[in-house]
Amino acid sequence: MHWWTDAPGVLAGHDLTGGGTWLGVSRDGRFAALTNYRARADVRSDVPTRGTLVSAFLAGERMVPMAYLRRGAGEGHRYNGFNLLAGDFTRRELGWYGNRADAASSLDQMIDILRDPCMADEDKLPATGLSIERERVLSAAFIETPEYGTRSTTALRVQAVGNGLSLTIKERSDDDGSHRIVRSGRFECAFELDIAS
């Protein structure tokens, strides 16, 4: 992470191969982060690098996060799979866009997807420098090993309602409150709240 000389005011790492970045902030209060959607079979080599989505938000014309994400939604098909967070601390706004998402799923469906312990086939695993055994374990949405694993799964939905927002959040946990893992996800809590605009 460093201050960019070609975009003064941007503090971020720099992808020296593809350009762009995966996480950064700007002096004027913008924030953006990107995660890759792991679907090796869908990766195309003839598309723009996803990291430019972050750097364009941070270094480009100042835009409201949701406007930037809406514009990105129209161009999302041009990129390999990603999740993008864009925010503005001064405006107290944060938004998300994923180009491989189906927002119509219920919170229970989302949690079930995130709790899938199935591991990828060996030929679908990325080569990140980890052992093949470790890559296999980490390929699961829900990770279970004796020394490392998923403790809880949380799904959140925000929807525009009138002049405000409606937020629904649900968590399924494998921790009974004693900070010990107790499989299999029997502890749930859910909240709904309205947020004024």
Image: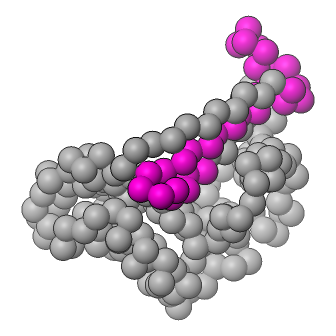
Q: Residue furthest front?
A: 162
Residue at point 64% right, 71% down? 100
Q: Quadrant of residue 67?
A: bottom left
- Residue depicted at 75% across the width and 60% down the height: 105
Q: Quadrant of residue 12?
A: bottom left
Seen from the viewer's position, the closer of residues 157 and 40 is 157
Left or right side of 13 for 182:
right
Q: Is residue 185 magenta?
A: yes
- Image mark count: 0
Q: Nearer the viewer, residue 61 or 44?
A: 61
The residue at 76%/20% (across/down) is 175
Residue 148 location, x and y as percent? 72, 30
Question: Is residue 184 in sight in this rendering?
Answer: yes
* Outermost residue to the bottom: 46
Region in magenta: 157-186
**Residue toward you, 125 or 64:** 64
Q: Position of residue 58 (x, y in %)?
A: 25, 63
Left or right position of 38 against 7: right
Examine the structure image and report whether residue 134 is included in the region drawn in magenta. Answer: no
Which residue is found at the position 76% from the left and 54% from the top? Answer: 106
Q: Is residue 17 visible?
A: no
Q: Position of residue 138 (x, y in %)?
A: 73, 47
